[in-house]
Image (cartoon, grey):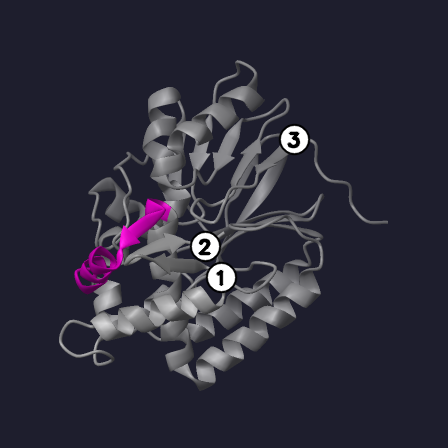
Amino acid sequence: MDPVWPPDVVVFERGWLSSNNVLMQGDGTTALVDSGYCTHAGQTVALVASALHGRTLDLLLATHTHSDHCGGHAAMQARYPEAHTLVPQGQYQAVLHWDAVALGHSPTGQQCPPFRPHAALRPGSELPLGQRVWQVHAAPGHEAHAVLLFEPQSRVLVSGDALWQQGFGVVFPELDGVHAFDDVATTLDLIERLQPHWVIPGHGSVFTQVPAAIAHARQRLHRFVHDPEQHRHYAAKVLLKFKLLECGCLPMDALVAWACSTAYMQQLVRGDGGPTGADAVHALVRDLERSGAARVQGGVVFDGE
C-alpha cells in the first residue's frame, strides 16, 4: 500500500522565481526548508505565519544557498529571531562571512540579503523536523554542497534542484570549469536507491512519478555530457529568464548591459557576438520568444506568460 501524505508537511508551491517552501510542523519542531527569492520575502513570511497559527518557527533550513532558495532567510530571521538557521556544511563559512561570489549570487547577477547561520547541515546526519526524523543526504551536481532531505516512513523527499519532474537545475560547477556531470548522475542514483514515493522539488508541483522523472533527468544529462554547449545554452537562457522574472520587463539595451556585466553571462556569451556579446543576448531573447517565455515590444523585453 502506498504511504499517506504526512499531515505535518505543508508545501507552498511558488512561481519559478522563488523555490517552493516546505513547512514542517505538528507537535514537534517547526521548520521551514527554503525561503524563496528576496522580492517575494514578504509573501513567504505571511504564508508561514498564517500556517503556524501563532506558533514560533524553530528551524530555518536551506537545501542550498542559491538566491531563489535562501533569499527570504533574512526576512524570516527578522520575523522569527529565535529560529535556528542551518545551511549545508560546505557553504557554512561562505554564509558566515557572506562571500557573495562563493555563494553564486554575484556571478549570477542575483540579489540575496545577508543572513546569519547558526549551524551546518551535515550529510549523513538526521534531524527532527515537524513530527518526523529526516535524513540529510549530500546532493552535489546543481550545486557542489547541496543536500536532500528524506523521511523514510512517509517516503517524502525534498529534492531542491537535484530533481524536478522535468529535469534538474543548471549544473553551475560546470560553468566554473569543474567537472560535475558525474555528480549529477551520482545524485540521481542516490534518489533511485532511496525510492521516494513523493518528491517535493525546488520548483514545480509535488510529484509521485519518480522513476519517470529520473529517466527524463538521465536523458537530459546524457545530452549535456555529449554536447556541453547544450548545457551552456540552457544555462544562459535560464539566467536571462530569471532576470525577466525578477524585473518583469527591461529595455533590450539594459538587458544586454546586465548580461555583459554579469560573470556567468559574460562566460556564456563570450565569442558569440563580438566584444560586447550583444548579438548573443539578442539570439537568446529570440529563443525565449519562440518558446513563449518572453516577448519583445518597442525595444523592451517582457517576461512571457
**Amino acid on which the number 2 mark rests in the picture:** Gly
The residue under label 2 is 304
Q: What residue is shown with label 1? A: 292
Q: Earlier in the sequence, mark 1 or mark 3?
A: 3
In the rendered image, the residue lying farthest to the front is: 298
Magenta segment boundaries in residue numbering = 246-262
Residue 281: x %, y % from top left: 28, 69
- What percent of the width, then of the height, locates residue 293? 46, 59
Mark in the foreground, 2 or 3:
2
> Label 2 vs label 3: CA separation?
35 Å
Label 3 sits on residue: 8
Height in image: 174 above or below 98?
below
Classify mark 2: helix, strand or loop: loop
In the rendered image, residue 228, in percent from the top left (x then y), is placed at 39, 81
Residue at 50 percent across and 46 percent down: it is 125
Structural crowding at the residue carrying mark 2, measured as other residues with C-alpha within 10 Å and reported as few (<14), some (14–19) or many (≥20) = some
**Which-is-in-front pick, marks 1 and 3?**
1
Within 10 Å of disc 1 (Cα), the crowding (few <14, some 14-19, many 20+) is: few
Amino acid type at mark 3: Asp
Q: Earlier in the sequence, mark 2 or mark 1?
A: 1
The image quadrant of residue 86 is top left
Work out whether residue 176 can be spotted: no
